């Protein structure tokens, strides 16, 4: 596809070799941008088995797919090595969070540091006017401020992992496919005769394509935290070899003796003692949490409590809530109704309709106001400004 003669500027596009980023590049080329495709080498598979499974993280085939798309649309293509940065800011973070008994979101860390920090810096050296990715999200400018909106295709919406963006970053970014559905994106790829039109979507964490987290994490642990597994009364019902193998809400593969007729779930992980608490499903239902590292996309934290819809996991639903900004970039969130499995290490993201207001990292659930202190031992209210 030939680009038009009059250029709108230079667009550096992060290209994974998949259909979304490929169509993002093609749409910008069609709009008249001088497109420069960039594929980032992030992770080197440690063995042949993982390399064969790895279909979503800078494989040779992915690089070639991205290069072929660039050739098709008349764009330059570069292959940049970010392995060191990816190891430090994504892999090491991923392992250390599990080591602490938390459940990280590596895609969020990859977006925040790799794509929207390191790649943007490199794009500036390329004299880029805009940096684009294949995320299903939208950016709108209203009264001089930039807003991040959910993607039109809510089944593919990726705004949850973009809450860390600043006004300065939003001004430089473009999400060309945010107004389209996945089916429409594949249709555009077919219209343009792109060979990747029917390429399957990636499903797993890109550096763990076989989905076996423990196999990946255990050799990289600096320490293990074995301990007891107790029920809500404090009775020991089992033991474990390390808290890294558990997450809040987990039911499967629990090494416990269950003398009840009801299934047991992980409801608390104490990283200091190594103690894991299990209980029935209703013990997972909470209404309050504390989040750290909160980013407000407007650049200014709200005063007092505000009404939002909040989401506590990538594929979760938005639930009405109140959010109150606290000192040290913290926030207290109280949901109108209980939500299931508030999980430390995951993100909580705040929405006003389809607009992303902000978000932060879940640190812990807070005691229920009417619980009378009946919360699991992991519930704390120690952050500055948190109300009991």
Image (cartoon, rainbow, N blue to C red):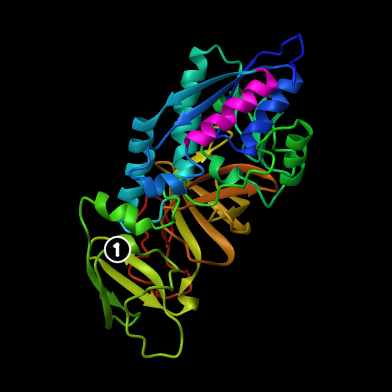
Membership of 262 in magenta stretch: no
Q: Residue 14 occupies which quadrant of the picture? A: top right
Answer whether residue 303 is visible to the viewer in this image: no
Tell which of 376 and 125 is nearer to you: 125
Where 237 falls versus 39 (above or below)?
below
Tell which of 190 and 122 is nearer to you: 190
Would you say 109 lies left or right of 67 here?
A: left
Q: Residue 80 occupies which quadrant of the picture? A: top left
Crowding around mark 1 (Cα neighbors within 10 Å: few <14, some 14 to 19, many 20+) is many
Residue 43 location in percent, x, y? 39, 37
Tell which of 181 and 373 is nearer to you: 181
- Residue drawn at the location 70% of the way across and 27% of the way down: 26
Residue indicated by mark 1: 243
- Residue drawn at the location 26% of the way across and 64% of the way down: 242
Would you say 387 lies left or right of 19 here?
A: left
Residue 260 location in percent, x, y? 40, 90
Image quadrant where one finds the C terminus: bottom left
Would you say 55 lies left or right of 245 here?
A: right
- Residue drawn at the location 48% of the way across and 44% of the way down: 107
Membership of 68 in magenta stretch: yes
Would you say 34 lies left or right of 95 here?
A: right
Residue 70 location in percent, x, y? 63, 23
Image quadrant where one finds the N terminus: top right
- Residue drawn at the location 62% of the way across and 34% of the way down: 21
Where 353 falls versus 1 (above or below)?
below
Q: Which residues are magenta?
A: 59-74
Examine the residues drawn in magenta and state their main secondary structure.
helix
Residue 314 location in percent, x, y? 55, 53
Q: Residue 279 occupies which quadrant of the picture? A: bottom left
């Amino acid at each position: 596809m030939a680009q038009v003669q009059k250029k709108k500027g230079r667009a550096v596009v992060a290209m994974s070799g998949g259909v979304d980023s490929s169509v993002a590049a093609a749409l910008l080329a069609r709009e008249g941008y001088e497109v420069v495709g960039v594929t980032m080498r992030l992770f080197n598979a440690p063995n042949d088995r993982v390399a064969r499974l790895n279909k979503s993280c800078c494989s040779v085939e992915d690089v070639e797919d991205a290069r072929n798309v660039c050739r098709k649309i008349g764009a330059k293509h570069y292959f940049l090595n970010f392995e060191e940065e990816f190891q430090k800011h994504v892999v090491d973070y991923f392992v250390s969070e599990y080591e602490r008994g938390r459940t990280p979101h590596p895609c969020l860390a990859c977006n925040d540091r790799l794509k929207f920090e390191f790649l943007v810096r490199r794009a500036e050296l390329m004299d880029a006017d805009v940096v684009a990715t294949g995320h299903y999200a939208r950016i709108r400018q209203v009264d001089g401020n930039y807003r991040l909106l959910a993607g039109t295709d809510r089944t593919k919406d990726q705004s949850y992992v973009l809450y860390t963006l600043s006004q300065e970053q939003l001004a430089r970014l473009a999400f060309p496919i945010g107004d389209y559905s996945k089916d429409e994106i594949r249709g555009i790829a077919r219209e343009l005769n792109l060979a990747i039109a029917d390429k399957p979507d990636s499903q797993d964490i890109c550096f763990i394509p076989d989905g076996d987290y423990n196999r990946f994490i255990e050799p990289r642990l600096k320490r293990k935290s074995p301990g007891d597994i107790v029920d809500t009364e404090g009775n020991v019902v089992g033991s474990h070899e390390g808290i890294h193998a558990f997450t809040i809400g987990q039911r499967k593969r629990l090494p416990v003796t269950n003398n009840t007729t009801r299934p047991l779930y992980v409801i608390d992980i104490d990283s200091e003692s190594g103690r894991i608490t299990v209980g029935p499903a209703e013990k997972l239902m909470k209404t309050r949490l504390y989040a750290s590292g909160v980013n407000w996309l407007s650049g200014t934290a709200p005063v007092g409590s505000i009404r939002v819809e909040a989401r506590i996991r990538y594929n979760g639903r938005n639930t009405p809530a109140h959010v109150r900004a606290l000192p040290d970039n913290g926030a207290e969130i109280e949901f109108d109704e209980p939500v299931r499995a508030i999980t430390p290490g995951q993100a909580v993201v705040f929405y006003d309709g389809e607009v992303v207001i902000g978000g932060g990292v879940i640190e812990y659930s807070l005691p229920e106001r009417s619980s009378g202190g009946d919360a699991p031992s992991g519930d704390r209210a120690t952050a500055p400004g948190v109300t009991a």
